[in-house]
Image (cartoon, rainbow, N blue to C red):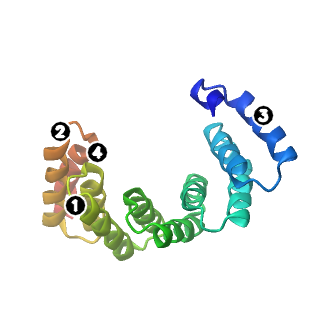
Amino acid sequence: ACYRAKNDIQKQIFYLEEAAKLNPNMPDIYFNLGLAYSDAKMYLNARYALESVIELRPAFKEAHFNLGTVYYKTGWYNEAIAEFTKCIELSPEWFEAYLNLGSSYLKVGKVAEAKSQFEKALQLKPNSAEANYSLGIAHTKLGNYDEAEMLFKKALNIEPWHRMSSVMLKELENYRKK
């Protein structure tokens, strides 16, 4: 972990790979290796390392979350959905897992499911600009433009610098004209 703090990812990967060879049954080593691979954008390696963590310790919620993130970044959205769902089963109060699950549902066109996850995220953190924005996106896709507008404005009220909410407020004018 000290090499991660110094941002020397290649050294971190080297030492973690060596540690994994010496201690093949230690999930924490594979977890840190998965994070290092992910930081290096070596997503296939990250996937294998994080899958090894889950094999060794199935209830390791952070491994499920990070594996879901790797799947999302590589376009494996259904797999991301499965991992974020498992993460929420293990830790029902994990705000970011609901946001990521909702975003994954959006990617596969399941807007109603995405909306539901963003609403759950908002229940956990009502003053999250990101959750208000994300729920606004779902409402936009569902054609609920008034609700979307209210959510984008709320996001901007929470974080006036939330650029995407400003962009979406302008875009709503175009959606309403269609």
Looking at marks 3 and 1 on the same chain, the residue that comes earlier in the sequence is marked by 3
The label nearer to you, 3 versus 2, is 3
The residue type indicated by label 2 comes to Pro
Q: Quadrant of residue 19?
A: top right
Residue occupying the point 73% across, 66% down: 55
Looking at marks 3 and 4 on the same chain, the residue that comes earlier in the sequence is marked by 3
Residue at disc 4, secondary structure: helix
Quarter of the image that includes the N terminus: top right
Q: Position of residue 2 (x, y in %)?
A: 63, 29
The label nearer to you, 3 versus 1, is 3
Residue occupying the point 15% across, 65% down: 147
Judging by the rendered image, the residue that carries numbered circle 3 is: 15
Judging by the rendered image, the residue that carries numbered circle 2 is: 160
Looking at marks 3 and 2 on the same chain, the residue that comes earlier in the sequence is marked by 3
For this view, does 95 lie left or right of residue 175? right
Residue at disc 1, secondary structure: helix
Q: Marks 2 and 1, how far apart in space?
A: 23 Å
For this view, does 125 lie left or right of residue 37? left
Seen from the viewer's position, the closer of residues 64 and 112 is: 64
Q: Residues within 10 Å of mark 4 (few under 14, many from 20)?
A: some
The residue type indicated by label 4 comes to Met
Residue occupying the point 44% across, 68% down: 105
Q: Marks 3 and 4, how far apart in space?
A: 40 Å
Judging by the rendered image, the residue that carries numbered circle 4 is: 164
Q: Residues within 10 Å of mark 3 (few under 14, many from 20)?
A: some
Find residue 175 and name its label.
Answer: 1
The residue type indicated by label 1 comes to Tyr
